[in-house]
Amino acid sequence: MLTLLLLLRLIHDLAAATLVGSVIFNYILLRPALRLIPPAHAVVIAQRVGNLFTYTGWTALTLLFLSGLLRLYYTGRLGLLISLDLYGHGPGRSLALMIFFWFVTVVSSSIMTFALRPKLMKKLSVSSNPTLADVEKRRADQIYASAWLDRLQLANLITATLALIAGSAVALGGLF
Ligand code: HEM
Protein backbone atom coordinates (compact mmCIF):
# COMPACT_ATOMS: atom_id res chain seq x y z
CA MET A 1 0.00 0.00 0.00
CA LEU A 2 2.82 2.38 0.93
CA THR A 3 4.53 1.71 -2.41
CA LEU A 4 1.29 2.34 -4.29
CA LEU A 5 0.76 5.64 -2.46
CA LEU A 6 4.36 6.63 -3.17
CA LEU A 7 3.91 5.79 -6.85
CA LEU A 8 0.69 7.84 -7.03
CA ARG A 9 2.46 10.72 -5.33
CA LEU A 10 5.33 10.53 -7.82
CA ILE A 11 2.87 10.53 -10.74
CA HIS A 12 0.97 13.47 -9.23
CA ASP A 13 4.12 15.51 -8.60
CA LEU A 14 5.68 14.77 -12.01
CA ALA A 15 2.42 15.66 -13.78
CA ALA A 16 2.19 18.91 -11.76
CA ALA A 17 5.83 19.76 -12.60
CA THR A 18 5.25 19.01 -16.32
CA LEU A 19 2.09 21.12 -16.48
CA VAL A 20 3.39 24.14 -14.59
CA GLY A 21 6.84 23.90 -16.24
CA SER A 22 5.40 23.80 -19.73
CA VAL A 23 2.94 26.67 -19.25
CA ILE A 24 5.78 28.79 -17.85
CA PHE A 25 8.06 27.81 -20.75
CA ASN A 26 5.32 28.57 -23.29
CA TYR A 27 4.29 31.94 -21.93
CA ILE A 28 7.46 33.40 -20.49
CA LEU A 29 10.17 31.97 -22.76
CA LEU A 30 8.73 30.82 -26.09
CA ARG A 31 6.14 33.58 -26.71
CA PRO A 32 8.59 36.53 -26.53
CA ALA A 33 11.23 34.55 -28.51
CA LEU A 34 8.74 33.96 -31.36
CA ARG A 35 8.28 37.72 -31.72
CA LEU A 36 11.98 38.02 -32.65
CA ILE A 37 11.85 35.78 -35.74
CA PRO A 38 10.05 36.25 -39.08
CA PRO A 39 6.25 35.71 -38.71
CA ALA A 40 6.14 32.88 -41.29
CA HIS A 41 8.68 30.87 -39.24
CA ALA A 42 7.07 31.84 -35.95
CA VAL A 43 3.68 30.51 -37.10
CA VAL A 44 5.14 27.11 -38.03
CA ILE A 45 7.01 26.77 -34.70
CA ALA A 46 3.95 27.94 -32.74
CA GLN A 47 1.78 25.34 -34.50
CA ARG A 48 4.24 22.47 -33.91
CA VAL A 49 4.85 23.36 -30.26
CA GLY A 50 1.11 23.93 -29.81
CA ASN A 51 0.37 20.41 -31.11
CA LEU A 52 2.89 18.83 -28.74
CA PHE A 53 1.69 20.98 -25.86
CA THR A 54 -1.89 19.85 -26.46
CA TYR A 55 -0.82 16.23 -25.84
CA THR A 56 1.49 16.86 -22.87
CA GLY A 57 -0.94 19.31 -21.24
CA TRP A 58 -3.96 17.01 -21.49
CA THR A 59 -1.92 13.99 -20.34
CA ALA A 60 -0.72 15.94 -17.27
CA LEU A 61 -4.25 17.17 -16.45
CA THR A 62 -5.67 13.63 -16.76
CA LEU A 63 -2.88 12.09 -14.65
CA LEU A 64 -3.34 14.79 -11.98
CA PHE A 65 -7.04 14.01 -11.72
CA LEU A 66 -6.65 10.20 -11.69
CA SER A 67 -3.67 10.07 -9.32
CA GLY A 68 -5.36 12.63 -7.04
CA LEU A 69 -8.64 10.70 -6.90
CA LEU A 70 -6.81 7.38 -6.30
CA ARG A 71 -4.78 8.93 -3.48
CA LEU A 72 -8.00 10.08 -1.82
CA TYR A 73 -9.55 6.64 -2.36
CA TYR A 74 -6.60 4.68 -0.92
CA THR A 75 -6.31 6.99 2.09
CA GLY A 76 -10.07 6.63 2.78
CA ARG A 77 -10.84 10.31 2.06
CA LEU A 78 -12.79 10.07 -1.19
CA GLY A 79 -16.11 10.69 0.60
CA LEU A 80 -14.72 14.05 1.81
CA LEU A 81 -15.15 15.42 -1.71
CA ILE A 82 -18.93 15.27 -1.48
CA SER A 83 -19.14 16.41 2.14
CA LEU A 84 -19.17 19.90 3.63
CA ASP A 85 -16.63 18.66 6.24
CA LEU A 86 -14.02 19.30 3.52
CA TYR A 87 -14.33 23.04 4.16
CA GLY A 88 -14.20 22.71 7.95
CA HIS A 89 -10.39 22.52 8.19
CA GLY A 90 -7.36 24.15 6.52
CA PRO A 91 -5.99 21.12 4.63
CA GLY A 92 -9.49 20.36 3.27
CA ARG A 93 -9.93 23.93 2.03
CA SER A 94 -6.56 23.82 0.25
CA LEU A 95 -7.44 20.45 -1.29
CA ALA A 96 -10.73 21.94 -2.55
CA LEU A 97 -8.85 24.95 -3.91
CA MET A 98 -6.40 22.69 -5.78
CA ILE A 99 -9.26 20.77 -7.38
CA PHE A 100 -11.10 24.03 -8.21
CA PHE A 101 -8.04 25.47 -9.99
CA TRP A 102 -7.54 22.16 -11.82
CA PHE A 103 -11.15 22.45 -13.03
CA VAL A 104 -10.66 26.06 -14.22
CA THR A 105 -7.48 24.96 -16.07
CA VAL A 106 -9.46 22.15 -17.74
CA VAL A 107 -12.20 24.60 -18.85
CA SER A 108 -9.74 27.08 -20.34
CA SER A 109 -7.68 24.27 -21.98
CA SER A 110 -10.89 22.91 -23.56
CA ILE A 111 -11.68 26.32 -25.07
CA MET A 112 -8.10 26.51 -26.41
CA THR A 113 -8.07 22.97 -27.84
CA PHE A 114 -11.59 22.68 -29.23
CA ALA A 115 -12.55 26.26 -30.16
CA LEU A 116 -9.49 28.46 -30.68
CA ARG A 117 -6.81 26.14 -32.09
CA PRO A 118 -9.06 24.80 -34.90
CA LYS A 119 -9.74 28.45 -35.90
CA LEU A 120 -6.01 29.14 -35.93
CA MET A 121 -5.12 26.01 -37.91
CA LYS A 122 -7.99 26.34 -40.41
CA LYS A 123 -6.86 26.06 -44.02
CA LEU A 124 -8.82 27.31 -47.03
CA SER A 125 -9.22 24.54 -49.59
CA VAL A 126 -8.25 25.64 -53.09
CA SER A 127 -11.04 23.50 -54.59
CA SER A 128 -13.66 25.63 -52.75
CA ASN A 129 -12.44 28.65 -54.75
CA PRO A 130 -12.06 31.08 -51.81
CA THR A 131 -12.89 34.73 -52.46
CA LEU A 132 -10.91 37.66 -51.11
CA ALA A 133 -13.62 38.08 -48.46
CA ASP A 134 -13.06 34.42 -47.35
CA VAL A 135 -9.32 35.01 -47.07
CA GLU A 136 -9.85 38.20 -45.05
CA LYS A 137 -12.40 36.52 -42.77
CA ARG A 138 -9.98 33.67 -42.10
CA ARG A 139 -7.20 36.14 -41.30
CA ALA A 140 -9.47 38.08 -38.92
CA ASP A 141 -10.53 34.81 -37.23
CA GLN A 142 -6.88 33.82 -36.80
CA ILE A 143 -5.93 37.15 -35.23
CA TYR A 144 -8.91 36.87 -32.86
CA ALA A 145 -8.05 33.24 -31.97
CA SER A 146 -4.39 34.07 -31.45
CA ALA A 147 -5.18 36.98 -29.07
CA TRP A 148 -7.51 34.75 -27.02
CA LEU A 149 -4.98 31.89 -27.01
CA ASP A 150 -2.47 34.31 -25.46
CA ARG A 151 -4.93 35.37 -22.76
CA LEU A 152 -5.93 31.81 -21.92
CA GLN A 153 -2.29 30.74 -21.80
CA LEU A 154 -1.74 33.38 -19.16
CA ALA A 155 -4.90 32.22 -17.34
CA ASN A 156 -3.56 28.63 -17.36
CA LEU A 157 -0.21 29.78 -16.03
CA ILE A 158 -1.95 31.48 -13.11
CA THR A 159 -4.49 28.73 -12.30
CA ALA A 160 -1.98 25.84 -12.61
CA THR A 161 0.48 27.70 -10.35
CA LEU A 162 -2.27 28.41 -7.80
CA ALA A 163 -3.24 24.70 -7.86
CA LEU A 164 0.43 23.83 -7.21
CA ILE A 165 0.62 26.27 -4.28
CA ALA A 166 -2.65 25.00 -2.78
CA GLY A 167 -1.55 21.35 -3.24
CA SER A 168 1.82 21.95 -1.59
CA ALA A 169 0.05 23.51 1.41
CA VAL A 170 -2.28 20.53 2.07
CA ALA A 171 0.27 18.52 4.06
CA LEU A 172 1.34 21.66 5.98
CA GLY A 173 -2.06 22.49 7.45
CA GLY A 174 -3.48 24.38 4.48
CA LEU A 175 -3.22 27.96 3.25
CA PHE A 176 -5.97 29.41 5.44
C1 HEM B 1 -3.39 21.55 -11.80
C2 HEM B 1 -3.78 20.59 -10.99
C3 HEM B 1 -3.04 20.13 -9.75
C4 HEM B 1 -1.78 20.44 -9.27
C5 HEM B 1 -0.76 21.41 -9.89
C6 HEM B 1 -1.61 19.70 -8.04
C7 HEM B 1 -0.47 19.75 -7.26
C8 HEM B 1 -0.30 19.10 -6.04
C9 HEM B 1 0.86 19.21 -5.19
C10 HEM B 1 2.11 20.04 -5.50
C11 HEM B 1 0.63 18.45 -4.09
C12 HEM B 1 1.59 18.30 -2.89
C13 HEM B 1 2.61 17.25 -3.10
C14 HEM B 1 2.02 15.88 -3.00
O1 HEM B 1 1.50 15.51 -1.91
O2 HEM B 1 2.05 15.17 -3.99
C15 HEM B 1 -0.66 17.82 -4.25
C16 HEM B 1 -1.23 16.95 -3.35
C17 HEM B 1 -2.43 16.32 -3.55
N1 HEM B 1 -3.31 16.47 -4.62
FE1 HEM B 1 -3.05 17.72 -6.21
N2 HEM B 1 -2.73 18.93 -7.81
C18 HEM B 1 -3.63 19.16 -8.82
C19 HEM B 1 -4.88 18.59 -9.00
C20 HEM B 1 -5.43 17.64 -8.15
C21 HEM B 1 -6.70 17.00 -8.35
C22 HEM B 1 -7.64 17.24 -9.54
C23 HEM B 1 -6.88 16.14 -7.28
C24 HEM B 1 -8.02 15.22 -6.95
C25 HEM B 1 -9.07 14.98 -7.64
C26 HEM B 1 -5.72 16.24 -6.42
C27 HEM B 1 -5.50 15.54 -5.24
C28 HEM B 1 -4.40 15.64 -4.42
C29 HEM B 1 -4.22 14.91 -3.17
C30 HEM B 1 -5.18 13.89 -2.56
C31 HEM B 1 -2.99 15.34 -2.62
C32 HEM B 1 -2.36 14.88 -1.29
C33 HEM B 1 -2.83 15.79 -0.20
C34 HEM B 1 -2.30 15.35 1.16
O3 HEM B 1 -1.14 15.68 1.46
O4 HEM B 1 -3.06 14.72 1.85
N3 HEM B 1 -4.86 17.17 -6.98
N4 HEM B 1 -1.21 18.24 -5.45
Image: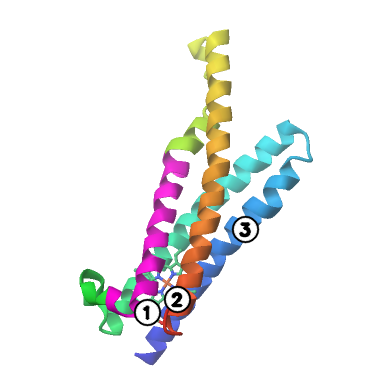
Q: Give the overall secondary structure of the magenta segment.
A: helix
Could you tell me which secondary element the residue under label 2 belongs to? loop
Label 2 – label 1 distance at C-alpha = 7 Å
Q: Earlier in the sequence, mark 2 or mark 3?
A: 3
Q: Is mark 1 within 8 Å of ligand 1?
A: no
The picture quadrant for ligand 1 comes to bottom left
Amino acid type assigned to the residue bearing label 3 in the image: Ile
Label 3 – label 1 distance at C-alpha = 28 Å
Q: Is residue 48 above or below residue 20?
A: above
Could you tell me which secondary element the residue under label 3 belongs to? helix
Pointer 3 residue: 24
Q: Is residue 175 left or right of residue 132?
A: left
Pointer 1 residue: 90
Nearer the observer, 55 or 25: 25
Q: Give how far across and how far down residue 111 sits, in percent.
A: 43, 42
Position of the C terminus by quadrant: bottom left
Q: Is residue 132 above or below residue 43?
A: above
* Residue drawn at 62 percent across, 44 percent down: 48
Question: What is the number of the mark on residue 175?
Answer: 2
Foreground: disc 2 or disc 3 = 2
Magenta range is 87-114
Colour scheme in the image?
rainbow
